[in-house]
Every structure is written in C-alpha cells, then in structure tokens.
Amino acid sequence: MHLQAPMENRDSDRIRKNRTGCICGQADDSIDVIVWEDMGSIRRAEAWFVKIACTIFVRSNSLDRFLGYFSKHLTPSLVYEVVNKLNFPNLRFKFVEFSRDKLHINNHSYWTYSLLLRSLCQSDLHNSAKLVYDWMRCDGQFPDNWLLGFLVSSYALAGRFDISKELLVDVQCNDVGVNAVVYNDLFNILIKQNRVGGAIVLFRELIRLQYRPVTYTVNILMRGLCRAGEINEAFKLLEDLRSFGCEPDLITYNIMLHGLCRFREVDRARGLLNEVCLKRGFGPDVVSYTTLISGYCKLSKMEEATLLFDEMIRSGIEPNIFTFNALIDGFGKFGDMASALAMYEKMLVCGCPPDVATFTSIIDGYFRVGQVNRSMEMWQEMNERNIAASLYTFSVLVSGLCNNNRLCGAHDILRLLNQSGIVPRPFIYNPVIDGYCKSGNVDKANQIVAEMEIKRCKPDKLTYTILIIGHCMKGRIYEAIGIFDKMLAAGCAPDEITVNNLRSCLLKAGMPGEAARVKKALGQNLTMGTSSSKKSYHESTNADMPVAVIYICIAIPSKILLIVFQLGDRFRDNVHLRFWQYLERSKSHSSPSQHDMDAG
C-alpha cells in the first residue's frame, strides 16, 4: 500500500524549510526538520509518518493491512515519538505491544519505557505497567533511580507492596546502585499504611542481599516501630544497627526516647538518656530532655520532671518554649499553680515569650483548682498580648465556665469562637447545650445547636442525646421525636442510652407505636455494629452498651458521665424520668487534652 504524506502550508516558525515530505518515496530528508510542540525536533518525513501512524492506530479497526507500511518505516526512535503523541495510556501500551508482537521491535529506547511506565501508573493501570517493566528488563535495561523510585512508590500506594518488593529485589540482585531516597519513600508509605511489620521484613531481606542502609533510613523504621508500640523490636533494630554498617545518631536516640515516653515507659527512657550522656561523639540536646520531662509531667511525676529540668540547666542546655510549656501544663494538671506560675516567671526571665499553649495551660490549671476569676484574668492577659486562641483554648474556657455554672460566660466564649474563623467541633458546644438542658432551658440549648449548624459544625451523638433527654425531661415528646429522626437522617447512630430514655417517655405518653419504631432503629444499629469488622475508638466506647439496672456512659471527648437508675416496674411509670441523673460531670476536665488535640 502506497501512502503519500499530505502537503500543507504551515507557519514559518513551525517549519524551517517548506518542502514536500514523502514517507514512502525517496525524498531527500537529510536537512528537512519540523518542530512540533509535543514531539521535539525530528525529520519532516518522520514527523509526517508519526502523524499518519497515530491516525491509523486510533481510527483503524484492523492493523494487519498496514503491517508492511509499519515494518518498513517504524524504528525504535519513532516508537517513542508515536507513544509521546498518543494521549491515552492504554493506546500507548497497545502501540508498543503491537510493535513488539507484530513487528518484532524489541530494542525500544529507555525513554519509551519511562514515558509508558509513568503514564500507565498515573492512570492506575499497574498490571499493564508491570508487563512493560518486564519488556524493559528483557531488553536488558534497568530503571534509573528516578524511575525506580516512582515505580516502587506508585505500586506501594496502590496497595501492591508485593510488586514494589519484587522491583527492589530485582535491582538489588543485579548489583544496581539504588539511592537511599527510594527506600526512604517506600518505608514511609508502608508506615503510613500501618504496615511497619512488612517494612521490617523487607528491610531484613534486603540486608541479606547486601543492602547497606544509611542511618536516616533506619531512623524511619525505628520511628514507625515506636509509633506502633513495638518498642522491643525498635531496641532490637538499635542493637543490630552497627552490623548494618551504620552508627546511631542523636535523632535515633530521640526517636527511642519519644517512643518510650509515649507508652509511659519513662523510667526506661531515663536509663536510655543516661546512656546518651556517656556517648563520646554527641550528647543529649534540648529535644532529649524535653521529651523525658514531658513524659514525667504526663504521669504527674513533677518532682522527677523538676530534677531533670535542673540537670538540663546544669548541663548548659537552654530550655525552649516546649520545655517550659510541658512543666507549666504538668503543674497545672497536678493542681500546683504556685509552681506553674513560678515556671512561667522563669520562662519570661529566660527571654522565652509565652505562646497560646502556655496561657491555655495556666487557664486550665486555675479552672481545675476552682479559681475562675484568675482563669479569666489570664485570658484577658492573653488577649492583651495579641496571642490568638486555639480550638483547645476555647474548649478549656467553655468547659471550665460550664463546670462552674457560668453558662452565660460560656455562651459569650462561643460567640467569640464563631467570630474567630476557627472551625469549631461539637465537643466545644456540648457542655453549654448540656448546661442549658439541665437547667430546663431547652430553647436556649436549641439556639446553641442552631448556631453551631450555621458554622457548619454537625452535631454528634452526644449532642443529640443531650437534646433528646433534655426535651423528654421537659415533657416535649414530639420535639424529642423530631430530634431523634434528625439524628437518624444525619447518619448518627443512636445508642441504648438515647433509645431507652426516649422509649420510656413515649410509652408513658401513650405512644407505643413510636416506641416500637425507636426500638427498631436501635436493633438496626446493633445489627450494623455486629456486622462491622472494625470500629473506631469512639464507636467502640460509646455504642452497643447493655441495658442494666445502672447504665453508665462515658462520653468521649467531653468526659461527661451519664448515670441512669432504672427502677422496678411498680415505680417506673411515675418516677423514671426523675431518676435520670444525666450529664453529671466528673471532676476531671471535660475537654480533650492538648496532647489529644495534637494527635488528632
């Protein structure tokens, strides 16, 4: 079949010489060059061939009648140009497959494979990409570190860790140098996917294949083990470090200190810190001491924390804002506000300016010891210093004021929150809603809910439970039913506390049909909970509680204690609702801690 390339007039900046290009003829194309924006610089005749080849491949149903044409003109370099011209990864793959199977072109350029592999992986066509990689290896080519890193990470992100492992083992067995970044990216991905065990298995398998890691890579693995609570495995890795040709650095030990303190093994961390102090090449830094001081503070071991702080000063290491904040927060939670203020004053003397965490801890501490006015004075000082409040600060203020029966003040803080631009969360509103419901002012509670919905803060299970119980206690049964239906429509599953209280009110009001519907909703929720293989922390702590003589519900994060006494049948009809001593706050703070907020 004879195909003549068409003659077209093109802009002078696109064509350097305006000559006819004949693909199948004998035209002299030694100096004719065409520049296409997406093709680079190739001969004019080849450029026309690429255009025609793309058209044929896209529009023709059968390529058999063009085999002679392609076999005469298609070369490995032109395969790249065609692949680059085609827009869709699956068409690119089919063209390369056609060139290999039908035309037996098996020496494609590295850039053809690189372009094809990247486009296939980016389009989630990983099976086809693996086949292309096998073609590349059959041609005797290896990916460079850029391409290898891309492939390994892409397969790991797609959940194909087996392929990532296979690629690394392949290049390792062939003595191809692999940059540490390739391993680092892969291990970071696996750790984020909670597959630190798989990362360790791969690491040790690569070690057997003569892989020599750098300390930074080992630190990634140790951080993953510590976060997963595998402290002993992390220590084992630390012991084996020198056999890998690595030396632990200060970051290695700081990772271990943080992991031990996170799981409350502070005394063990103290021993490790002493070991670091004996190192010749380096010693502990402010991060090392602050990590351990914070660990002691979280366990309320303030004497040990103070001693360590003094040791740190004697060692010539200056504390930073995190060190002071850890101690101030620890003293505040311990109820020792005199020591907290002394540390605050020392902080100022050292030239370390306080931040939002500093003031929030002091405000929280004063609320804990019942000095509400002092809390508000520190809040005022914080504003005078132009320190912007955080979500946790607002939570501390609202909960502290509600715990001291200052609902109006707490409502004022909520208004400031709504004006601050901070995205609120339900646990901040719940104490105020709870307080108004307990005082019988459910209209005010409904107003708070309306305000939070305006701020696009959706009520949670505790919010709905507070409202339903509050409306039931006021005898506003129909409104309680409406709130329950709204709860279901929002996809918020009720628990037995909510359902049994509402059912009791409905039965007392002579509405057995509605009571049966409510009970059915609980049954569906229990069925869904049983069929689910995994539950979140909140679901596992707040849902599916058995009905007993005493119901107890710890509401996280507000830490509000619900205690319900269900009396015998003889008394239930008259006094059931009166014995719902709901939403009695425990003495502990009703807000999540700063540590919980940071972790979330």
Image: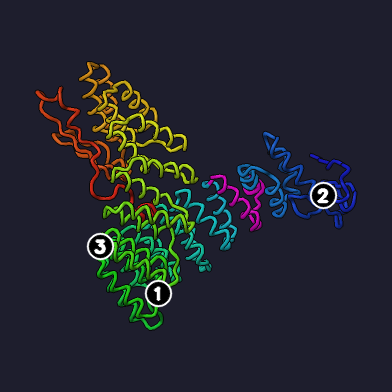
Contact? badges 2 and 3 (CB < 8 Å) = no
Instruction: Tell me if residue 114 is in the magenta stretch.
Output: yes
Q: Which percent across, then down, holds residue 438?
A: 27, 35
Residue 110 falls in image quadrant: bottom right
Question: On the picture, is 263 further left or further right than 23?
Answer: left
Q: Look at the picture and state if 480 lies above or below 194.
A: above
Is the residue marked by circle 3 packed among few (<14), some (14-19), or many (20+) residues within 10 Å? some
N-terminal label among 2 and 1: 2
Amino acid at dot 2: Ala
N-terminal label among 1 and 3: 1
Disc number placed over residue 285 in the picture, else none: 1
The magenta region covers 98-125
Q: Which percent across, then down, holds residue 431?
A: 32, 41
Magenta part, dominant SS: helix
Is the residue marked by circle 1 packed among few (<14), some (14-19), or many (20+) residues within 10 Å? some
Mark 2 vs mark 1, CA separation in Å:
68 Å
- Residue farthest bottom in this picture: 280
Q: 583 or 538: which is nearer to us?
A: 583
Q: Look at the picture and state if 568 lies above or below 371.
A: above
Q: Which percent across, then down, holds residue 452?
A: 42, 37
One can see residue 492 in this view:
yes
The residue at which mark 3 appears reads as: 300
Label 1 secondary element: loop
The residue at which mark 2 appears reads as: 45
Amino acid at dot 1: Asp
Label 2 secondary element: helix
Amino acid at dot 3: Ser
At 79% across and 39% down in the image, what residue appears?
A: 1
Label 3 secondary element: loop
Q: Which percent across, then down, holds residue 305?
A: 29, 69
Instruction: Tell me if residue 593 is in the magenta stretch.
Output: no
Residue mark closest to the camera, 2 vs 3: 3
